[in-house]
Image (tube, coloured by chain):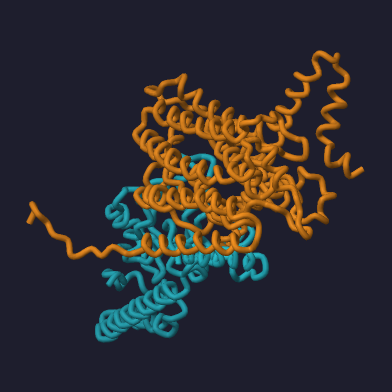
Amino acid sequence: MLEKADQIFLLLRDWLVGYLPPGWRAAAGAVLGVIGIVAVFPGLFAIAVLMERKGLGRMQNRLGPNRVGPFGILQPIADAIKSLTKEDIVPTNADAVVHFLAPVFLVVVAFMGFAVLPVGRNMVLVNMDAGLLFYFAMGASTEVSIFMAGWSSRNKYSLLGAMRAVAQMISYEVPLLLSSVVIVMMTGSLSLVKIVEAQNQYTWGLPHWYIFTPWGCAAFIMYAVAATAETNRSPFDLPEGESELVAGYFTEYSGFKFALFFLGEYLGMLSISGLGTTLFLGGWSAPLAVLNWVPSWIWFFSKIMLSISVLIWVRGTLPRLRQDQLMNFAWKFVLPMTLLNLMVAALWRFMGDGWARWVVCSAILLLVYVGAGRIGMRREHFGPRTYRYAE
Amino acid sequence: MLGEGILKGLTETARNFAGSFVSAERLTTVQYPEQRIPTAEAARVFPFLVYDGTDWEAGMRCVACQICEKECPPKCIYIEKSKDKKPDFVGKMQIYPAKFDIDVSVCMSCQICVEVCPFEAIKMDTEFELSTTDRFGGLLYDRKQLSRSNEYYHEIHPTEAAEVDARLAEEKAKAEAKAKAAAQATAAKAAADPSVPAKAAAVPAASTVAPAAKPAEAAPAPKPSGGGE
């Protein structure tokens, strides 16, 4: 019974596909999988938006939306109807084709990333050997669509927002990749399915998730920072800084295209949380061996929503960074730390079993973290301002 | 250590998040259409016309002097004087506005009309829910729509209204005293003048008996300078 609940989506697919002639079954199964992804993740997007609005409200001692439906739970539907019925305005000087293609491209690319994420036991749309590479290739493509949007709008705020977004995303792509590389080093595979299977083991009932190792924990923290920046979330939401850039690269978008950008952004959040879950939090594996009877996909989705809640929590807490702080943090702190973490992971691998490697690896990482933090946080003292030419 | 401040901030927001569920006094907002915060006493939105008594048309304090119309910076007031006159609060005959329109879509709530009015006839309202589906006619208020009783004024600005009432009462008392003095003077003159028969002296004598009860009849004739000081 529980086995059936665990595999319910696969059984459902096989049952539906069974009505077709054998030659069509593989293709129809793939299409059904795609339909599943396209239906489930926008649903999660609606839940995430509602969680965000309610949660941010509570953090600011407000109630949040509570008018549409009981406790405001129908708010996402009202928002969807609103954006669908709004007028779609394209500026006269805009490049209409690119202006139209940008949000479509963003959403398509955001959906592509889900293809390689293992959602549950045996539940992955494409079990690619180089799944991680495919994922990052798709993730990097969102930058193209953002630049398309900024450039085609022919608006200085859009362009500035797009430039900022591309600069930021390229800068944080490097630590994002490097913090994931340690997982590949330890697992010896780029396949996300194999990465989850490597973590789905238990010692004394506790899981072998990579976050519970010194290098995994460090990599997870840096992955989380880079992922926040990669999805343009607060405190790294400079590309859409309302106070200086109107809305950044989607200033000139309205109606459903705006909604598509919004959807793309949240799909990016969901997929990058999914990847973080897969790499560090054991994917669909249960947090305790005794909880293995719960269907695996429930664990995956609850871990994703937990990550989203943390992102919302961070958004409710931190103010926006300045552009130079953002770049300094990426290149002068996170990148060196990820490189160090690669060395530490190698050290861990070659020190063999035993408690010594726990102490040594943790000590190195902590010392460097504290030291680099000290140096990075040193305050620069500026003297009184002197003018060379104007007096 | 690096990140300490972030953790501190995260605990603060977490405390807010949890606290907003358990203690209602943490919530800084009210659920507006159902719950309302009473407006501050000094709040002001758009002007209204004050009237005394119960009949807005008879009790209207405005005498159509048109000072507010001339002073209004965005020129949102339009006044037409009446042809006839009606008694004001001290009983003096005054003209009144046959038409008094304020276009609240133009009004900028500067309160200059209130400050220049010598008759305490125009005051600022606190009513702010003025939305209408007709943006032209619906936002042009005529004198009937603008009229509010003095009791309403007391309700929304109690301190200010009390001051205004005290001032008006003082003015009224002064006007009455003046009327009384004038009446006595005429009476004395009548008494001194032998050619006038005794019945002429009897009339002002009767009016001095009860001046407080019926000042309106006594006041108008002998006092031409009015109570506008």
Looking at the image, residue A340 sits to the left or right of residue A306; the answer is left
Q: Is residue B20 above or below residue A28?
A: below
Measuring from the top left, give residue A360's x and y in whole percent. Answer: 54, 62
Q: Chain A appears what colour?
A: orange
Q: Chain B appears what colour?
A: cyan
Task: Return the residue nearer the eye: B17 or B117.
Answer: B17
Q: Can see residue A357?
A: yes
Measuring from the top left, give residue B147's x and y in whole percent. Answer: 48, 58
Task: Return the residue nearer the eye: A376 or A92.
Answer: A376
Q: Is residue A165 above or below residue B28?
A: above
Measuring from the top left, give residue A101's x and y in whole percent. Answer: 51, 23
Looking at the image, residue B105 sits to the left or right of residue A59; the answer is left
Number of numbered discs visible in the structure rendering? 0
Task: Return the residue nearer the eye: A273 or B192.
Answer: A273
Residue drawn at the location 60% of the way across and 38% of the way down: A267
> Considering the image in quadrants, where does the C terminus of chain A appear?
bottom left
Task: Return the residue nearer the eye: B93 or A198.
Answer: A198
Looking at the image, residue A311 sits to the left or right of residue A154; the answer is right
> Considering the image in quadrants, where does the N terminus of chain A appear?
top right
Q: Quadrant of residue A45?
A: top right
Measuring from the top left, give residue B228's x and y in whole percent. Answer: 29, 69
Residue drawn at the location 50% of the way across and 42% of the way down: A230
Q: Is residue A164 above or below residue A324?
A: above
